[in-house]
Amino acid sequence: MGVSAGVHVVTVGVPAGAEPDPEAAAVAQALADAGAPVASRVAIEDDEGALERALAPDDGLTVVLAGAGAGDLVRRVVARAIGARLVLSERFLAALEEGYRRLDRPLPRRAERLALLPQGAQAWTTEHGEPGFVLESGARAVVVLARDGGLRTAVERHLVPYARARAAGPGAVFLRTLRTAGVTAGELEERLAEWLGQRESRTGDVAVGLVPGEGEVWVRLRAKGVDAARALARVESPVLDALGADCYGRDAETLELVVGRALLERRLTLAVAESCTGGLLGHRLTSVPGSSAYFERGVLVYSNRAKEELLGVPAEVLRVHGAVSAPCAEAMARGAAERAGTACALAITGIAGPDGGTPAKPVGTVFVGLAVEGRASARRFRFLGDRASVKWQSTQAAFDMLRRALRGRT
């Protein structure tokens, strides 16, 4: 959890065989002058695999210099490496709007996409150029800066002070992220009032704050100083007690990773049946290395006919209750488990929007079915947000239901 002195600079968007990058050299020199010497410098093309490998170290500071057009790729890979969801940063979007206003140019339609940052990231803004951001997880930190006209200012104003603070021994920063699901930020504020105060306060040398997201809330503990590690541990223990079963993991542990680990430890297998999420549940499961040891299969069943033929959902259930209902979700989960021969199954059916809602079942209504060792159940949810957000929150709820059901099983 402690901070490593290693600093790595990665330049993204450099054609093969290009000349040495003077911008990266200048950044490395500025870091060295700040007492944070660069351990490695790498230049890569717009390639996700190459960037993932460059971000491999579990500690230290990685500075990513993103070339024109590489921003989407960089944000996507960094989020995946840290185990974070891309969410809209209002501060980042406001900085983009202000930058285009100064240039007397209209904000591009893709501005909201540019303002998608990994959950928990802190935006770094300047008067000129695209904003950057820093994302911390445990002892690891990733800084992303655009290789444009504002790079020098961003380095001087944000990167150098940040790197200097990390490199200073007595000022070393220890960060712990406790991830929760199935509980709202409001409920956590009440539960953690002793440590939070007005959303963020100090207990000794430990600052505690909440980072709400889609389908989960992070509790961030940050300690600084000579005795930071001990101070953080002292606060973390009672905070964990207060979070209880709602805390599913630490730092970069995602729900799909935690669920996969639980299945593996219990030697259980899983099948999934998806309607409104279109394969997102299976995609998240198979993004975890080694998931073939516990994930057996997934089926997409959008039509009633598919639900009947592939999962054995009774026609009577569909006629009386409809495809978006608890009985249907339960039958889907039961059918998936029976046909796959797995101990566990998850099923999702709902209305992701933007159309298709009714007064009784508005957009965002989702039913999640769960089957574990012969017993099936279903829960109703109502999620807010656009289609992508509803789909993501649906998979979060499904994973959390399975995680809780597996607790205590050996």
Image: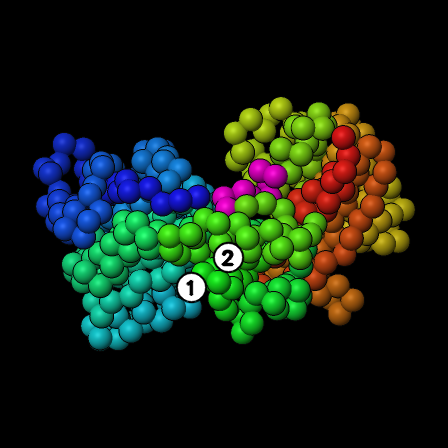
**Which of these two is toward me, 155 or 351?**
155
Image coordinates of residue 59 in percent, x first then y, are 37, 40
322 in relation to 196, above or below: above
Q: Is residue 125 left or right of residue 20?
A: right
**Which of these two is toward me, 66 or 62?**
62
Q: Is residue 342 left or right of residue 177?
A: right
The residue drawn where x is 28% and y is 42% is 5
146 in relation to 3, above or below: below
Which residue is denoted by mark 2 in the rendering? 220
Q: Residue type at mark 1?
A: Ser
The residue drawn where x is 21% and y is 41% is 38
Q: Residue type at mark 2?
A: Arg
Residue 364 shows up from this direction:
no
Q: Is residue 338 left or right of residue 274?
A: right
Q: Is residue 255 magenta?
A: yes
Residue 319 shows up from this direction:
yes
The residue drawn where x is 38% and y is 68% is 91
Instruction: Read off the magenta span.
Output: 251-258
Q: Is residue 85 magenta?
A: no
Q: Residues within 10 Å of mark 2 (few under 14, many from 20)?
A: many
Image coordinates of residue 124 in percent, x first then y, are 31, 62
Mark nearer the N terminus (2 vs 1): 1
The residue drawn where x is 13% and y is 47% is 29
Q: Mark 2 falls on what kind of element?
A: strand
Q: Mark 1 falls on what kind of element?
A: loop
Image coordinates of residue 14 in percent, x first then y, are 20, 40
Which residue is denoted by mark 1 in the rendering? 89
Q: Quadrant of the N terminus?
A: top left
Q: Which picture quadrant has residue 7?
A: top left
